[in-house]
Amino acid sequence: MTAPLEPDEADLIAAAVLAVPGVAGLHSGLFGEAVTLLPGRRIEGVVVGHESCAVHITVRCPGDPDSVVHAVQEVLARVVRIPVVVTVEDFAVE
C-alpha cells in the first residue's frame, strides 16, 4: 500500500528534497507511477508507504549524482523514520 501516513508527510518530504542542492526537481517516474495522490492534487516523485518511502528526483548537471542521492537520504533521515529509496530518474543540464 502506498498511502501516506499523514497527508502533510508527502508535502514535507517533497519540500525537504527540493531544498537539497543539486536536486532540480521531483520526477513522477517513467510511467507516472511515483506519485502520492491526495484529495484534489498529486505530489509527483514521492511515494510514502507504511514501511518505506520512495523518492524520484531529477539531478542538476554538472554534478555528482551519488553525492546528491546521499544528501537527499541524509535530509530525509531527519524527516521520516522509515527507510528511503532515492531514484535518479533524469538529469537537468543548466
Image (cartoon, grey):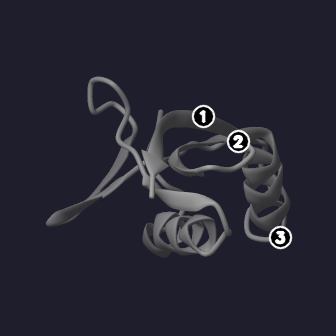
Relative to residue 21, is residue 45 depicted above or below? above
Give the image location of residue 86, x and y in percent. Answer: 66, 40
Q: Where is residue 8 in the image (x, y as percent from the top left)?
A: 47, 75
**Mark number for residue 87?**
1
* Residue that badge 2 annotates: 65
Residue annotated with mark 3: 78
> Residue visible at 83% across and 70% down?
78
Q: What residue type is labelled 3?
A: Arg
Q: Which SS class for mark 1?
A: strand
Amino acid under label 2? Pro
| Disc 1 crowd, CA 10 A, few/some/many (<14, 14-19, 20+) | some
Q: Residue at x 79, y 40 (%)?
A: 66
Contact between marks 2 and 3 (CB within 8 A): the answer is: no
Foreground label between 2 and 1: 2
Number of numbered labels in the structure image: 3
Position of residue 42 measured from the top left corner of the image (x, y, whole percent): 26, 57
The mark lying in front, picked from 2 and 3, is 2
C-alpha span from label 2 to label 3: 21 Å
Nearer the observer, 11 or 64: 64
In this picture, is 68 found above or below 19?
A: above
- Find residue 52 and name its label: none
Assign a secondary structure to mark 3: loop
Which of labels 1 and 3 is toward the front? 1
- Which sits earlier in the primary sequence, circle 2 or circle 3? 2
Seen as rendered, the residue at the extreme top is: 31
Residue 6 placement (x, y as % from top left): 51, 67
Q: Residue at x 80, y 58 (%)?
A: 71
